Image (cartoon, helix red, strand yellow):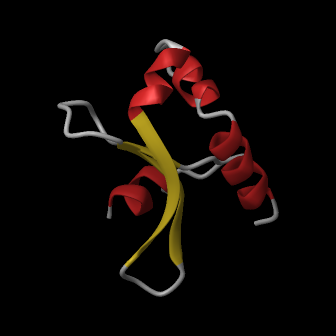
Amino acid sequence: MKTDSIFYRLFQEFPHIFFELIGNSGETANLYQFSSVEVKQTAFRIHGVFLPIQDREVPIYFVEVQFQPDTEIYLRLVS
């Protein structure tokens, strides 16, 4: 999908946007490093992951952007 790289670059350069979209303070982004990871399966790549920078008890956020109706997205995302 051509929009994948757009959202990767958006969250890479402006990570605070993600946290504001989910209702957290944009300052929360300072606790995280954003990257794209490939899961051990052929061509299964998550748009992005916000991983804590330091050993803190904060959640890990997986980012997947979807712009079309897909009733099975959650099934595929967590499987």
Q: Is residue 43 left or right of residue 62?
A: right
Q: Position of residue 70 (x, y in %)?
A: 60, 52
Mark yes or no: residue 68 visible: no
Q: Can you say whether 55 is above or below 3 in the image?
A: above
Q: Can you say whether 21 is above or below 7 in the image?
A: above
Q: Is residue 45 left or right of residue 31?
A: right
Q: Position of residue 16 (x, y in %)?
A: 59, 25
- Viewer-closest of 49 and 44: 49
Q: Position of residue 56 (x, y in %)?
A: 20, 33
Q: Residue placed at 42% from the left, 51% from the top?
A: 74
Q: Quadrant of residue 60?
A: top left
Residue farthest toward the bottom in the current orientation of the protein = 42
Query: On the rendered image, what quadrant is the N terminus found in?
Result: bottom right
Q: Can you say whether 22 is above or below 38 in the image?
A: above
Q: Residue placed at 46% from the left, 28% from the top?
A: 30
Q: Is residue 2 left or right of residue 29?
A: right
Mark yes or no: residue 27 visible: yes
Q: Position of residue 28 (x, y in %)?
A: 44, 21
Q: Residue placed at 54% from the left, 82% from the top?
A: 43
